[in-house]
Amino acid sequence: MAGVLAARYRDVPQVITNLLQVLFFLTPIFWSPATMPKRPVFVLFNPLYHLIEIVRAPLLGEPVSAMSWGLCIAMAVIGLSLTAWLYRRAHARIAYWV
């Protein structure tokens, strides 16, 4: 999806770079969910937390919750659907944008 959008709009790579830098601070790399007991909603509804959790939990010897798997699979299906829709709409014009 980012490739199609970047072919059409030249500023997309810079926007994605800056957005990823900001989103990096929302991931549980700098902080632990145990340090935020008063904000469980932020942790539970943070999609970046679940993406990191399915990698981190097995490394720590803990089981991955079904909620994390479900949300990650749902995000993958939604992302794939949006990307397929966008590509289907734009595939004939991509050569002219590049």
Image (cartoon, grey):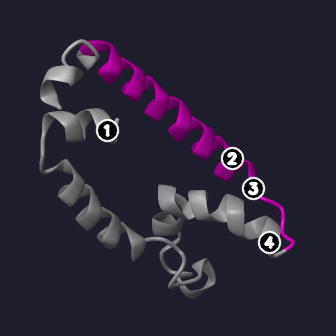
Q: Quadrant of the C terminus?
A: top left
As for residue 65 lying within the magenta part, the answer is yes
As for residue 73 lying within the magenta part, the answer is yes
Q: Name above or below for residue 72 compared with residue 23.
A: above
Q: Name above or below for residue 6 compared with residue 68.
A: above
Cα distance in 3D space between marks 3 and 1: 32 Å
Asked if disc 2 and disc 3 are in contact, CB closer than 8 Å, the reply is yes
Residue 74 in percent (x, y) is at 56, 36
Chief SS of the magenta region = helix
Amino acid type assigned to the residue bearing label 4 in the image: Leu
Q: Name above or below for residue 69 compared with residue 60.
A: above
Q: Which residue is mark 4?
A: 59
**If you read the primary sequence from the N terminus, does the residue marked by circle 3 or circle 1 appear first?**
1
Amino acid type assigned to the residue bearing label 3 in the image: Ser
Front-most of residues 73 and 39: 73
Q: Which mark is residue 69?
A: 2
Under circle 2, the secondary element is helix
Q: Name above or below for residue 29 compared with residue 1.
A: below
Cα distance in 3D space between marks 1 and 4: 32 Å
Of circles 4 and 2, the one toward us is 4
Q: Which mark is residue 65?
A: 3
Under circle 4, the secondary element is helix
Q: Which range of residues does the magenta coloring cover?
A: 61-89
Q: Which residue is mark 1?
A: 3
Tell me which corner region of the image, top left, top right, bottom left or bottom right, holds residue 21: bottom left
Front-most of residues 48 and 44: 48
**If you read the primary sequence from the N terminus, does the residue marked by circle 1 or circle 4 appear first?**
1
Q: Identify the residue at image location x=41%, y=72%.
A: 24
Cα distance in 3D space between marks 4 and 3: 14 Å
Residue 66 in percent (x, y) is at 74, 48
